[in-house]
Amino acid sequence: AIIQVPGVLLAQPHLATRPALEKMYPRPFFELFSRNRPDIDPYLLMAIARKESRFNPKALSWARAQGLMQINPDTAKRMTGREDSDLFNPETSIDLGARHISTDLSRFDGRLSFAIAAYNAGDEVVSRWIKRYAVSDPVLFLDLIPYRETRDYVGAVLSNYFWYRKLYSQEPLSMKF
């Protein structure tokens, strides 16, 4: 079972050993996440998949989102022009999820918090929030997200991303939040 780190660290900080953290932040399907996508950090994709499906390729949400990256069939159809995308196939799910977050990052000028919020709530919704609140500061934006689910989602994905990068990446973390 995948455990969120903050609760464990608060209750029993001595458990935060590297082996324990690696169990909390596993890397299943790493070869698929790390395919040649120069514009997307594989650890960002893993952070999203960890939150979306806990790496269950057969995950199905109440909103009909499917697979590792929890892509809705309607979203897949818009992205591919096809109705027959096998969203339970890890390769398909990761490829579509990577395209989705890449589009969101481009749309929001690389600002990670905005792109992650758009992955969850939709880019039109996030654009309305940015316009409504006239905010460019990502921390303030997080506080102003009116959907609690999306607010919690962005925080969880950013936390996941931090831990994946801290545990496995050799490169320093530099990004626009």
Image (spheres, rainbow, N blue to C red):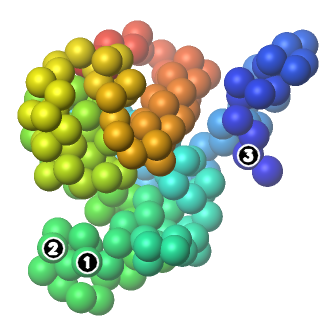
Find numbered disc 2 in the image and state the secondary structure of the residue it sits on: helix
Marking on residue 2: 3
Residue type of the residue flagged with mark 1 = Asp
- Cα gap from disc 2 to disc 3, whole angstroms: 32 Å
Closest to the camera, between mark 3 and mark 1, is 1
Q: Hey, what amino acid is under mark 3?
A: Ile
How far across and how far down the image is residue 38, in percent?
23, 36
Residue at the outermost bottom position: 84
Pointer 2 and pointer 3: residues touching (CB < 8 Å)?
Answer: no
- Tell me the amino acid under the disc marked 2: Arg
Q: Are marks 1 and 2 in contact (CB under 8 Å)?
A: yes
Q: Is residue 151 left or right of residue 114?
A: right
Disc 1 is placed on an element classified as helix
Q: Quadrant of the C terminus?
A: top left
Return the mark for residue 78. 2
Give the left or right position of residue 83, taking residue 45 as reference.
left
